[in-house]
Amino acid sequence: MTGEIADLQALRDHLELLETKFRRLRRGLHVCFAFLVVALAALIALYILSRKLVVTESVLVVDTSRTERVAIDAPEEPQGVSSLSLADGSGHVRVLVSAGENACVLLRDGETNIPASLSVESDGSPRLLFRGPRMTDRMSLRLDAAERPVLEFLDEQGKVRLKLFLDELGSPRLEFFGPDGAVVWRAPAD
């Protein structure tokens, strides 16, 4: 029996040794964890303190073939007009958004033609304009100064030939114009 007691005593000593080692390991892990937390906090603080505001007038975004696809311009001078340009895969600007006094969105057909645009007129009213192949104004949808809708069809010289609108009472009106700009027929008749 003394042999069994000796074995139990050895087992107990071994378990106490393991428990002591485990406590030391756990204490060491706590210290390491605390160190990592402090180090991470220091890195975050350094990152926050080192961040800088990048000030520039233009930003270009290019695709993997180095073709300009997006341009953002924000000129510093007071008269400068902020703009956003979106280009196709060939680098041709297809959409131009301008934030000038008369803000507008221009849609381009490739290199230079602008077959459609959405703008804010000088009186603050919106206008959607479509142009023909020769870039003459052909159709316009807008709000007049009294915020009434107006649809106009124009000839190749840019003169209004047909106008559909709401009058001051909110009633629909239709007017046809001659080449000289004079009304040749209207409905309802005056």
Image: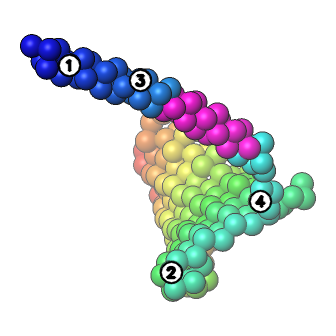
Magenta stretch contains residue 43: yes
Marks 1/3: CA distance?
A: 21 Å
**Boundaries of the magenta span:** 28-46
SS of the residue at dot 4? loop
Foreground mark, 2 or 1, reads: 1
Q: Nearer the viewer, residue 172 or 137?
A: 137
Marks 3/4: CA distance?
A: 67 Å
- 10 Å crowding of disc 4: few (<14), some (14-19), many (20+): some
147 lies above or below 15: below
Instruction: Give the residue drawn at x 46%, y 52%.
Output: 164
Quadrant placement of the N terminus: top left
Q: Which residue is mark 1?
A: 6
Q: Nearer the viewer, residue 40 or 183?
A: 40
> Label 3 near label 2: C-beta < 8 Å?
no
SS of the residue at dot 2? loop
Indicate the amino acid at tag 1. Ala
